[in-house]
Image (tube, grey):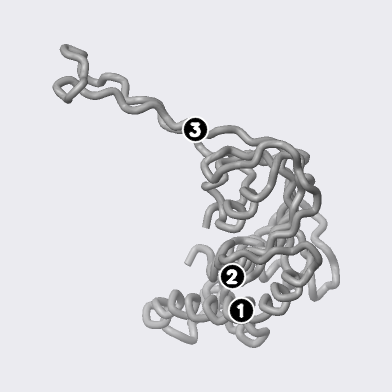
Amino acid sequence: MRKIVMLAAALAVTGCNQEKGTKPQTDDQKAFYALGLSVGRNLQGFDMTPEELEYVKAGMTAQLTNQQPAVDLQTEGPKISELARTRATAKATKEKEKSKTFLEEAAKEPGAQRTESGLIYKPLQEGTGAQPAASDIVKVNYRGTLPDGKEFDSSYKRNEPAQFPLNGVIKCWTEGVQKMKVGGKAKLVCPSDLAYGDRGTPGIPGGSALVFEVELLDVQKNEPAPAPMPMPGQPGGPQGAPQGAPQGQPGKPAPQGQPAKK
């Protein structure tokens, strides 16, 4: 409910701006516009028609201006979650259909290899260094785009390579980067089931194929955490050790800046 009220305010502001044909000028106007973008992104899964958006605006206007609502919120409100699921599933199905042709064309590119999982791997520059295992930590530069070429992520733009355990990211990366050697570059074309699936993620529609251009910079072994020290009384445990004996340090958390694991 709070998101709906927030979206109402955002739509009111952005709607006025669009009617006037102006861009937000003041800090408050820019903040409200950003609010509209943020909340609107969260509602993209509803895949609303222009007419349906007008009903959303009408309901929010009624709420914000204390008008008598046209429907009972307690009766209709519980239906929102099911509507969201239905619309998101339908939209993901359409995205997967759109991606089929794109994937087929990508698999026909010279040098491209389609694996059993459906990953399309195309080497762009062969490396000569170490080749990672799934359990290793890799350091990479990368650029991610949608099938239409729209960029959704880039370590180059952040001017900072990403580093992460290779088995802690999406399946497409875990499989594809293992084929590379340090110093190499490759293109990974990922079907949605090897990426973010039907649910998608902000900036990536559910069901969408993805394209990554990856440059492998370094590989490090991901050393396992020390085995926990046995507690007193356990086989092999120290006799007379105090309670709360060290249990070993947990493994390092995955760093930021990597494709999130599905």
Q: Earlier in the sequence, mark 1 or mark 2?
A: 1
Determine which of the numbered discs, if any, sits on residue 47 in the image.
1
- Identity of the amino acid at label 3? Lys
In the image, is residue 35 above or below residue 98? Answer: above
- The image position of residue 218, as x and y in percent, is 68, 35
Q: Residues within 10 Å of mark 3 (few under 14, many from 20)?
A: few
- The image position of residue 143, as x and y in percent, is 75, 53
Q: Nearer the viewer, residue 82 or 194?
A: 194
Q: Which quadrant of the figure has residue 123?
A: bottom right
In space, the residues marked 1 and 2 are separated at their CA atoms by: 11 Å
Determine which of the numbered discs, if any, sits on residue 152 in the image.
none
Of tags 3 and 2, the one toward the viewer is: 3
Which residue is disc 3 drawn over? 252
Query: Can residue 5 be seen?
Result: no
Element at badge 2?
Answer: loop
Circle 3/circle 2 CB separation < 8 Å: no
- Identity of the amino acid at label 2? Gly
- Identity of the amino acid at label 1? Asp
Of tags 3 and 1, the one toward the viewer is: 3
Q: Which quadrant of the figure has residue 129?
A: top right
